Amino acid sequence: MALAADEEFVQGGDVDMQTNGVVVELMHKYWPQCSSGQGASAATLLDIGCGTGLIGKMFMHAAERDGFFASEQARTESVLRGIDFSGDMLTHVPASLYEEALQHDVDVTPWPMYADSVADISICNGVFIYLKNAAVLDEFARTCKPGGKCVLMFRHDVLPAFEEKRDAMQTLGKWRLLEKTPTMDNFPGLTAGGLEPTLFNVFVYEVL
Ligand SMILES: C[S@@+](CC[C@H](N)C(=O)[O-])C[C@H]1O[C@@H](n2cnc3c(N)ncnc32)[C@H](O)[C@@H]1O
């Protein structure tokens, strides 16, 4: 599902941010499908560090454009939930799109608002750069159902702080890596202007 950079809601600096489209494509790829194989089923998404809800907006926009859901019921019963540190960002999250958007510092674990195994899919886009506590990765595994997917974007300059924990969780059988996207530059426009590239990969884990 290719996303055009000129989606109506992608404005300003977001136009040049390559990771958004990559994450949304992976959400569509790993969203649960109904048993008939005729489209996506209802599911619960956790958007960790949701900001203004941009990724949720992009996801639903593309889903509606492409007839992604198996039925209207599957669409309306899908639940988007988000948390973010910034109350200001959260004021922009559309209430019609996110069932709840709560203020919380993701580095403070366990995340008190989520019980175990509540999510079918979790995303974290553009947020690890701000986090310091590698135990947040345990929270992704705890809050996802077995078989659920965690779509995690890591910039290369933040990878070392998390990769030991990430790999240890695979060794411990908490999750397994399904996909690591090719290395991309998040801000090619800035790089063309002479700045160092901001390299990233998105990792998709299946919770075991
Ligand atoms: C680059 S924005 C990305 C927002 C959103 N994920 C997206 O892709 O549009 C980074 C977000 O991380 C949030 N953030 C930074 N540190 C955080 C923390 N410790 N806990 C929760 N959210 C945090 C910021 O408030 C901001 O909304």
Image (cartoon, grey):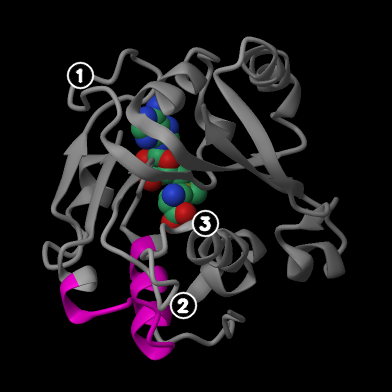
Residue identified by numbered label 1: 112
Horizontal and vertical percent position of residue 44: 27, 50
Q: Residues under labels 2 and 1: Cα distance?
A: 33 Å
Circle 2: residue type: Gln
Say whether residue 97 is magenta.
Answer: no
Residue at disc 1, CB closer than 8 Å to ligand 1: no
Q: Is residue 147 toward the left or the right of residue 13 in the image?
A: left
Camera-nearest label, 2 or 1: 1
Task: Classify mark 3: helix, strand or loop.
Answer: helix
Q: Residues under labels 2 and 3: Cα distance?
A: 26 Å
Which numbered tag is attached to residue 11?
Answer: 2
Residue 99 picture quarter: bottom left
Q: Quadrant of the N terminus?
A: bottom right
Task: Classify mark 1: helix, strand or loop.
Answer: loop
Question: Which stretch is magenta?
Answer: 56-73
Q: Reading the chain from its start, which is encountered first: label 3 or label 1?
A: 3
Q: Bin the neighbour count of mark 3 within 10 Å (Cα to Cα): few under 14, some 14-19, many 20 and up.
A: some
Circle 3: residue type: Tyr
Residue 157 vertical position relative to residue 13 in the rendered view, above or below? above
- Image point (20%, 34%), residue name: 103
Q: Bin the neighbour count of mark 2 within 10 Å (Cα to Cα): few under 14, some 14-19, many 20 and up.
A: few
Residue identified by numbered label 3: 30
